Amino acid sequence: MVRSVSLAEIPDAAKPDEAVWRPVRHHLGIHAFGINARTARDVGEEVIEEHVETQDSPTRHEELYFVTTGHATFTVDGEEVDAPAGTFVFVPDPESRRAAVAVERETTILAIGAAPGEAYTISDWERRHFPQE
């Protein structure tokens, strides 16, 4: 069965003081990989929270980020990556520390991840938001 939804139709699952978080994987019932979208409301707001996959979850996800709208600055292991809309940022090493901050209002980043060669495992971070999974 094909499922279709616009990003705006996926309810925001973030806490009031966080960037908008649209749980794409959960909303569509995807089980093969993780995928979420985050939107910063203001310049300087954290769009992708600083994290290391192996420290914050037992998963070892590679992550691919795609800036769909706006403009962000990623920091990966201390290296800054300028990422205007249309930019892919791939972080293959789950040990890498990564984060992204909005350079423009309403910056949206799509985050896709999974561990290579393994069945997909929901991260602890996502389980905290959706404990029924």
Image (tube, helix red, strand yellow):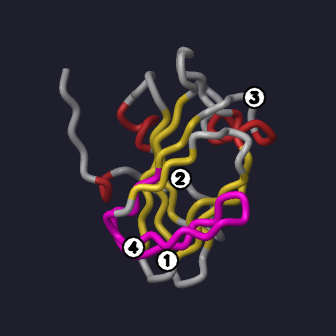
Q: Mark 4: give few (<14), some (14-19) or many (20+) Cα within 10 Å.
A: some
Question: Mark 2 vs mark 4: which is more N-terminal?
Answer: 2
- In the displayed structure, would residue 67 be above or below residue 130? below
Helix, strand or loop: magenta stretch: strand
Q: In x, y percent, where is residue 35?
A: 45, 41
Name the image quarter holding the C terminus: top right
Magenta region:
65-86
User: How far separated are the C-alphas under marks 3 and 2?
Assistant: 23 Å
Q: Amino acid at mark 4?
A: Pro
Residue for point 74% across, 35% down = 57
Q: In the rendered structure, find residue 41 and report the number of the disc placed on it.
A: 1
Q: Nearer the viewer, mark 2 or mark 4?
A: 4
Residue 104 or residue 25, whichever sits in front: 104
Where does label 2 land, which residue?
13
- In the displayed structure, would residue 46 be above or below residue 56? below
Residue for point 37% across, 62% down = 87
Where does label 3 land, which residue?
58
